[in-house]
Amino acid sequence: MKENSDTFVVCLYVDDLIFIRNNSKMFGDFKKAMIKEYEMMNIDLMSCYLEIEVKQGENGIFVN
C-alpha cells in the first residue's frame, strides 16, 4: 500500500458497523450514503463494541 493512499475500512457484525478511515471526506460521503439508505441510530465515536468498552482520546484508543 502506498504511504499517501486513502484508506477506508468498514467492519460489520450483525447490526453494528465500525468505520475506520484516514480521509475525512470519504468518511463523510459514506456516512451520508448510509444515512440516506438505512435507518442509523448512532454515528459517533465508538464507545462500546461487542461488550468491549472503547475510549478514544488525543493519546490514542484504549479498549477495556
Image (cartoon, helix red, strand yellow):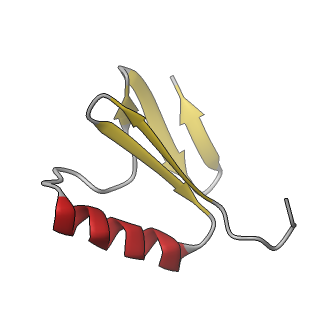
Location of the N terminus by quadrant is bottom right
Left or right: where 20 falls relative to 6: left
Q: Is residue 36 above or below residue 53?
A: below
Please name the residue shown 59% across and 72% down the image.
23
Say which of 62 and 2 sits in front: 2
Q: Quadrant of residue 43?
A: bottom left
Left or right: where 19 falls relative to 51: right
Q: Horizontal and vertical percent for residue 54?
A: 46, 35
Residue, far left: 39
Task: Say how many tags the image has.
Answer: 0
Q: Is residue 45 above or below residue 6?
A: above
Residue, far bottom: 25
Say which of 42 and 31 sits in front: 31
Q: Horizontal and vertical percent for residue 57?
A: 54, 52
Q: Quadrant of residue 7?
A: bottom right
Q: Is residue 12 above or below residue 6?
A: above
Please name the residue shown 57% across and 35% down the image.
62
Left or right: where 45 falls relative to 37: right
Left or right: where 3 falls relative to 11: right
Q: Horizontal and vertical percent for residue 60?
A: 64, 48
Say which of 23 and 51 sits in front: 23
Say which of 60 and 7 sits in front: 7
Q: Quadrant of residue 17?
A: top left
Please name the residue shown 19% across and 62% down the image.
37
Q: Horizontal and vertical percent for residue 16?
A: 31, 36
